[in-house]
Amino acid sequence: MSTSSAVDKSSLRWRLGPLWSLVSLLLIVTAATFITASFGKSLQVQVQYALVSLVIVVALQIFIGTSGVLSFGHVAFVAMGAWTVGLLTIDPVLKENLLPDLFPFLMHAQAPWILAVFIGAVIGGLLALIVAPVLMRLNGLQAGIATFALLGVVNLVLTYWSSIGPRSGQSMVGIPEVLDYKLALVFALSAIIFAWLFQRTRPSRLLRAAREDGIAAAASGINIVTQRVIVFAVSGAVAGVAGGLFALTNRVVQSSQLYIDLTFLTLAMLVLGGTLSLSGAVVGTLVFSAIDVFLTNLQSGIDIGSVSLSIPQGTRPIILGLILVLMLIFRATGLTGGREFVWPFRTVRPLPGNPPTNE
Amino acid sequence: MSTADTRQGLHVENLEVAYNGVPAVRGISFEVNAGEAIGLIGPNGAGKSSTLLAIMGATPRTGVVTVHGHDISGLAPEKVVRTGLALVPEGRHVFTELSVMDNLRLGAVARRDKSTYKSALEHVLDLFPILRDFGHRHAGLLSGGQQQQLAIGRALMSDPDILMLDEPSLGLSPTAVDTVFEALDVVRKAGKAVLIVEQRAEFTIAFSDRTYVLHDGVITLSLKPEDADNVEVLTEAYFG
């Protein structure tokens, strides 16, 4: 394709711009992880949970950010991943005692944890692919409610069907301790790289165009439902990976942990950062998690020199909720405004090959 | 429509559109053949845009619409594009956050012959040189006239046999309108069929091989280019 010389001169910057947005995110996450982890064992555990949340939020961003459609159902795919890893990594002897009603093939099924995480991703993606042709025809509130219904159904099945999990109200325990915060960091960075690469694929680009202008998309021959189905399935698979990481981090899996609380927690992180960009997913998770960790520690008291600071128990969710409300009032597009980082410290819309707006 | 129908171009027969029971288009028929431009004019609310949207499959309708003899009833807009029909929507609807080149690339999604993509792109960039100069610019930063050129260029990237435009002159400067219609003339001379819906009557009548006047959902007049200066005819067209 021929372009004018004026275009060629700065095209290198356009190409490097998006790459910088990726590199900066990887650097920020790595730095935040190691700095926080250096403060001791307890913070290392909290960092690991934050990294798991980050993978969930990246999965959410892949779908919500690309399609502009809200999903309250992604934790269902997280639950698929967590369940899979639980069932495949708990020792069979333990399973016979703790999960006596399991299907025989599940009772004996075993896999190395990393393979289990991969299988969890496949199952999460498959569930998304199966429900997508119906769900992806919906928009706005209907889509929100339908995806929430999916979460409800999955949660009920996991809670009460003891042939695929623990008896009602009980939990899966005995998941091996194989994941530390460094390994979780590797997964989180991989998820960011994957999401960044996926932004550059055809389905993602077509769906972003359709999100922006449905009329123009249809007139251009773009089948919005098909593109949404593809992106929903991919995002479901990433959520499945996150579920596996959650199981390996928490080491106890119970359906009640994979329900409304986690859904709203991760959505709040995405909204805080900005749904439309990958930077938003990362920044939102990091800032939200940092405030969360700080408030959690403040509730149990922090000693600064001779002074001991503390806030009453139960203050944490109130403050977090307040921050989110203020955010929605004063900056509804999130901390990043739905934009990606670009060197030197400017932001552009998350699309490959696009020029900075002032050129 | 029977498979024996060998007619080329766009044929619309007895097209009816209603919104919540209120008729907008009441059984109109017309045809657009290869290499000709047809105008559709009329006052606000006459049913012009409804006609285009109904042909595209974007709004429910009755009647028969055929492209090259094939009935396209019941097809979704993204499938209709693949039959060789393209619509430049009213208000241009370019993807403002995408670059000019990305807009053109998206236009090629529905191309039937992908192997000619590069030459088609060159053709569009020759037709609208400004798009070549601003290839990497965000489409949202273009002027109205440039966006209209981009919208037409994007539609041409799907390699349509029939190009439909909804109010291409809306909000454009006189020079920009000239540029757009000069390009449409090139498109017509290249053997494509062009269907233009417009409010600007004189311009459309002068440009089109035939212009139909739509009033309250019915075709009331058929005009030739030489009628463009006839004030009585125009008054009749707009005020009945």
Image (cartoon, coloured by chain):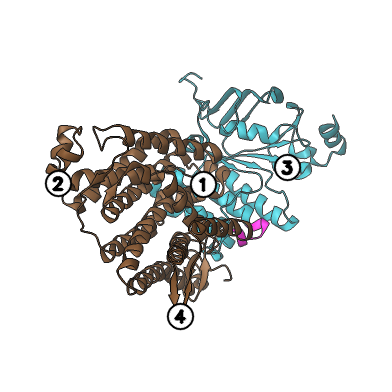
Q: Earlier in the sequence, mark 1 or mark 2?
A: 2
The mark found on residue A91 in the picture is: 2
Residue A111 seen anywhere in this rendered image of the structure: yes
Q: Which residue is mark 3?
A: B204
Do callouts 3 and 4 point to residues on the same chain?
Answer: no
Q: Hey, what amino acid is under mark 3?
A: Thr
Q: Which residues, given as a range, are shown in magenta?
A: B140-146
Within 10 Å of disc 3 (Cα), the crowding (few <14, some 14-19, many 20+) is: many
Helix, strand or loop at label 2? It is: loop
Do callouts 1 and 4 point to residues on the same chain?
Answer: yes
Q: How far across and down, in percent of the image, does residue B157 sit?
A: 50, 48
Residue situated in front as seen by the camera: A171 or A81? A171
Q: Earlier in the sequence, mark 4 or mark 2?
A: 2
**Which chain letter matches label 1?**
A
Chain B: what color? Answer: cyan
Q: Which residue is mark 1?
A: A210
Q: Quote the CA–CA distance across marks 1 and 2.
A: 47 Å
Residue at the spot x=34%, y=46% of the render?
A: A78
Q: Hey, what amino acid is under mark 4?
A: Ser
Residue situated in front as seen by the camera: A241 or A351? A241
